Image: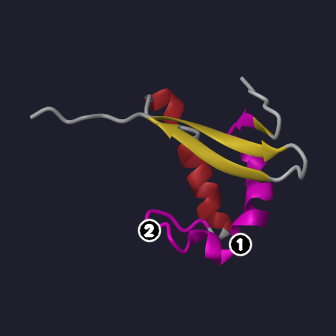
Amino acid sequence: MEPTGRYARLEPLSSAHIAPLSEMSVERSLWYSMSFADLSTPDVLRAGVMQAQTEPDRGVGLPFAIIDLAAGIATRRRYLTIAYCIR
């Protein structure tokens, strides 16, 4: 599934996206306000992508790379399952 819109295309996140994401991720200001992740190093980013790829099989998320059609720039996004704990 690769939905394409006017400005962007979603691609299932794969190891092929690690290199372009690494280029973008070195900008530390991207991670300043994100307390849950700092993917500014290639090794941490690679581990994050590899972990995200397991999410569909576990039923907890759908990781995508977002490709800007004009610039060819990749970013990533996840659609997560929200589970409520019933007490």
Q: Quadrant of residue 3?
A: top right
* The furthest residue to the front: 6
Q: Indicate the amino acid at tag 2.
A: Ser
Can you say whether 23 is above or below 83 in the image?
below
* The furthest residue to the left: 87
Q: Quadrant of residue 12?
A: top right
Q: Could you tell me which secondary element the residue under label 2 belongs to?
A: loop
Can you say whether 47 is above or below 40 in the image?
above
Q: Residue at x 65, y 39 (%)?
A: 64
The number of callouts visible is 2
Label 1: which residue?
26
Quadrant in the picture for the C terminus? top left
* The furthest residue to the right: 70
Crowd band around label 1 with a 10 angstrom C-alpha radius: few (<14), some (14–19), many (20+) = some
Q: Nearer the viewer, residue 2 or 4?
A: 4
Label 2: which residue?
35
Instruction: Please identify, in this view, whether the residue under mark 1 or under mark 2 is nearer the observer.
Output: 2
Q: Nearer the viewer, residue 21 or 3?
A: 3
Magenta span contains residue 28: yes
Q: Residue at x 74, y 57 (%)?
A: 21
Task: Using residue 39 as the reference point, say whether residue 34 is left or right of it.
Answer: left
Q: Indicate the amino acid at tag 1.
A: Val
Q: Residue at x 82, y 34 (%)?
A: 6
> Can you give x and y, in whole percent of width and height, for residue 46 in the image?
65, 57
The magenta stretch spans which residues? 10-39
Magenta span contains residue 3: no
> Can you give x and y, in whole percent of width and height, for residue 74 in the image?
77, 51
Tag shown at residue 36: none
Q: Quadrant of residue 16?
A: top right
Quadrant in the picture for the N terminus? top right
